[in-house]
Image (cartoon, rainbow, N blue to C red):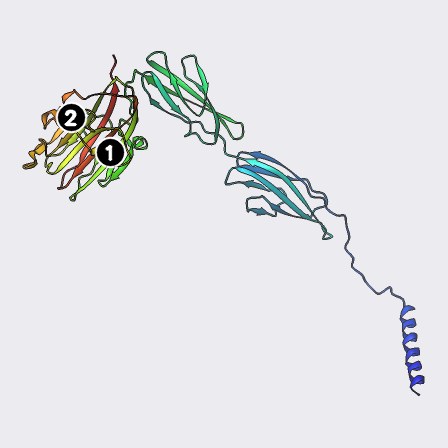
Amino acid sequence: MKNVLFKYILFILLAFVAFMACRDDDGIESKIVDGNKPKAGFSYVADAMTVTFTDKSVDAESYYWDFGDGATSTEKSPVHIYASSGNYTIKLKVNSAAGYSDTFEGGPVFVADKVEAAFSSVAELGLSVYFNASSSKNIVSARWDFGDGTQEEGLTISHAFAAEGEYTVKLTATGLLGDKSEVTQKIAVTKNMNLLKGSNMEADAAEYWHILSEGMNMKWGYTVDKPSTGQGGCLRFEGVSVSTNSLIYQGVQVQAGKKYKLSAQIKVPAGGLNAYLQFYIAKNASSASDFIESSGNPDTNHFLCLNSWNGWGNNTTGTIAADGDLYQIVRANGSYGLGASTGGIYTATETRTVYIGIKAFTQIRLGDTYVDTVLFELQED
């Protein structure tokens, strides 16, 4: 009985399959989307930091750009501005209407800002001038025309002029993109015997002076008040009400047997009790003690000093104010320091680096002290 029933059910199923196979299928709709596979591609034109991309893809319907700097776009032919110079690999992924995709990788694309030429100049010893083009933007190389018939190359360079006069100096800067920029300056060249840089104590002079201590607030290029014999801005040591000091220095190269004159223009207030303004010539500069130590020998570091223990204010009344030449003020107020008896002349005992130090100190409230036009000049034989 079970076998008969099984055969009957199997017969019915086979008959149903045969029936379905014989039906007319004109009423069945099958939506099949088909098409060509896309091919991604692009070209580009870089102009400094801006890159214009042009789509060259085939059979593409949608786009996805990766510019290599974290930024993306879905435009067909985008324009992208980079924030930083560098090389960037670009990826473009495209999709077709049929859902196929393709990716193209291009580059690296190099972008950089255009070069902007700029330079500074500092007078060196004699008729030499130090030129520095490092303030230029995006510079790779520099070519100088010094206006005296000579040309040289280098980002920084010292040039010796043959004679005093006014020269038009031209800098031609080449940038990261191979582009060029020019700038010219007229400079007056006069014979300079001063070894110190930043002698004018203007704001940009701070880069040449090292600081060992800064207990007193210092202001470079200060113009509210200044020595009457100075020029432009000066360095202000701000007076305070507690025991404190500031010490700055700069190293220079001297030659054995040569004479050098140390000078400065200063302005000091009355009320100099337990206070001083001291100029040193030291052979070491590792700590403040290298400047203030004095053993009484010919190489004593104290060179031209104004202090309340040796005349300035007599350390009792503190009524003496002074404005003018450092040497003259020291001579009038105690003549302390080796240079007070030599006319401010230092004779080098050996060829080496010496350090010109300036220190201001006060224990009792003192008004501001000002220093300007600090020179260390080689004396001609």
Identity, as a three-letter code, of the amino acid under mark 2: Gly
Closest to the observer, 221 or 12: 221
Q: Residue at x 29, y 35 (%)?
A: 286
Q: Nearer the viewer, mark 1 or mark 2?
A: 1
Q: Residue furthest bottom?
A: 1
Callout 1 crowding tier (Cα within 10 Å): few <14, some 14–19, many ≥20: some
Callout 2 crowding tier (Cα within 10 Å): few <14, some 14–19, many ≥20: some
> For residue 357, which numbered disc appears in the image?
none
Tell me the residue that label 1 is attached to.
290
Quadrant of the rendered image containing residue 275 = top left
Name above or below for residue 102 compared with residue 313. Answer: below
Identity, as a three-letter code, of the amino acid under mark 1: Asp
Quadrant of the rendered image containing residue 269 = top left
The answer, for residue 223, to whether it is visible in the render is no
Closest to the observer, 212 or 183: 212
Describe the element under mark 2 as helix, strand or loop: strand
The image position of residue 94, as x and y in percent, is 67, 47
The answer, for residue 164, to whether it is visible in the render is yes
Q: Does residue 63 appear to the left or right of 323 in the view shown?
A: right
Q: CA distance from mark 1 to mark 2?
A: 28 Å
Tell me the residue that label 2 is attached to.
324
Closest to the observer, 87 or 23: 87
The image position of residue 282, as x and y in percent, is 24, 29
Q: Residue at x 60, y 38 (%)?
A: 108
The image position of residue 174, as x and y in percent, is 50, 26
Name above or below for residue 104 compared with residue 121. Answer: below
Name above or below for residue 258 compared with residue 105. Answer: above
CB under 8 Å between callouts 1 and 2? no
Q: Residue at x 45, y 18 (%)?
A: 152
Describe the element under mark 1 as helix, strand or loop: helix
The image position of residue 329, as x and y in percent, is 13, 26
